[in-house]
Image (cartoon, rainbow, N blue to C red):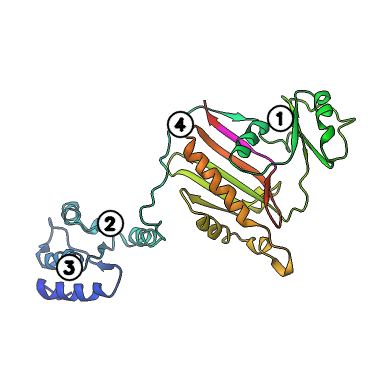
Amino acid sequence: FIWGDGPRTEAVFTTMLEGYDAGVYIIDPPRPDRCDPSSFEPALDAIVAAGRTTGKPAFPVASLPENLDEQRAIEMMDAGVAPLMGLETALAALKAAMSPAGAPGWRPIAATGPRETRMLDEAEGKRILEAAGVAIPKGVLGRTLDELRAKAAGLTPPLALKGLGFAHKTEAGAVRLGLQTLDGQAEIAGATGYLAEEMVTGTLAEVLLGLRRDPVYGVTLTLGLGGVTAEVLADTVTLVLPASREDILAAMRGLRLWPLLDGYRGRARADMGAVADIAVGLAALMIARPDLEEIEINPILVRQTGAVAVDALIREAI
C-alpha cells in the first residue's frame, strides 16, 4: 500500500479487487501498547472501503494470530469485514469459502436432538420401502419354519431364507442363499421370525444406500458400492439433503469404481438412474416422517433396467 496515504491506497485496493471475486491483504499492524499504529490505519480503512465500493469480500490477514489486536478486529467486523488471524487459518477459511455452494434458496433439513429409537426387522422395513415405491423381492413371512414352508410353495427358486431380528444377518449366520427348497432347513438360533424371498437375477451391481439424521448436518444421504465387501471397498459419497436427482447422479459419478457401473470395457450399464430414483423417494420419506431416524439398504441390486432393495435396516424414534 501507499504509506500513510489513505485515498490513494483505497483507490489501489479498489482497482485490484474489481478484477477478482475476493481480496486478501496481508497486514501486520504493531501492538498499540508498544508502537504507534496510526500509519497502518489508512491501509485498514482502505480495505473496508474497497470491500464496500466493490461489494466483494475483502479480507485483512495477519501473518500470525496475535498480530491483529482484539479491539481492531472487533472494529473491522463491525464494519462488515472479517479479519483472518494467521496465514494457515486464513488459507483454510478461504478454501472452505471456495467450496461449491448449494442452489439458491437451498437449506438443509433441520437436525434433531438425541432420542431413543428402535430397529425394525427386515420385513417391517421392507413394507415401508414398498409403500414408498421401492421395488423389493417377492416373499413370504412365517413365525416358524414350518409355517414359512407352507407359504413359500408359490415362490420360484432359487430362494433366500432369512432369520428376522438381526441387525447384521450375514455375521449372525441368519442368511441362506440359493435354496431350491426350504425342506430340511434348520431353525436359525435367535430368529424372531422368518422371511423367504425369490432371489433377484440379472444383477450388474450392488449398491449401498443410507439415510440418517445427523445431529449437526440434518438428513444425510450416503451412496456407494455395497454388498458384503462395502466396508472393504470404502467407496462412498455423502450428500447433505435436500438434493435433486441430478445432484445424486453427479455425486455417484465421483465414486472411484463408477466406471464399473457405467459400461466399463463394453459391459452393460447398471441402471443408476433407478438408484437415484430410490434415493429421491426415500429422502422425501425422511422429510415426511420425522420419526424415521435411519434407513439403510445394503444391497440394492441394480439391473440393466431397474433396481431392487434386497435388505433393509430402518430405525425409528420411540
**Which amino acid, mark 4?**
Pro
Q: Are marks 2 and 3 in contact (CB under 8 Å)?
A: no
User: Where does label 1 land, which residue?
Assistant: 164
Does 314 appear in magenta? yes
Residue 221 image position (x, y, % from top left): 53, 47
User: Where does label 2 land, which residue?
Assistant: 65
Residue 286 image position (x, y, % from top left): 50, 39
Instruction: Report the side of 76 relative to 131 (left or right).
Output: left
User: Where does label 4 land, which residue?
Assistant: 114
Q: Which residues are magenta?
A: 310-315
Q: Are marks 3 and 4 in contact (CB under 8 Å)?
A: no
Q: Earlier in the sequence, mark 1 or mark 3?
A: 3
Residue 293 image position (x, y, % from top left): 52, 35
Query: Along the line of sight, which residue is nearer the eye, 13 or 73?
Result: 13
**Which amino acid, mark 3?**
Thr
For the residues labelled 4 and 2, the Cα–Cα distance comes to 36 Å
- Label 1, secondary structure: give it: loop
At label 1, counting other C-alpha atoms closer than 10 Å, the crowd grade (few under 14, some 14-19, many 20 or more) is: many
Image point 29% across, 67% down: which residue? Answer: 22
For the residues labelled 1 and 4, the Cα–Cα distance comes to 27 Å
Q: Earlier in the sequence, mark 3 or mark 4?
A: 3
Image point 15% across, 54% down: which residue? Answer: 75
Say above or below: 191 vs 77: above
User: Where does label 3 land, which residue?
Assistant: 53
At label 4, counting other C-alpha atoms closer than 10 Å, the crowd grade (few under 14, some 14-19, many 20 or more) is: few
**Which circle, 2 or 1, is nearer the viewer?**
1
**Which amino acid, mark 2?**
Pro
Residue 260 in which image quadrant? bottom right
For the residues labelled 3 and 4, the Cα–Cα distance comes to 46 Å
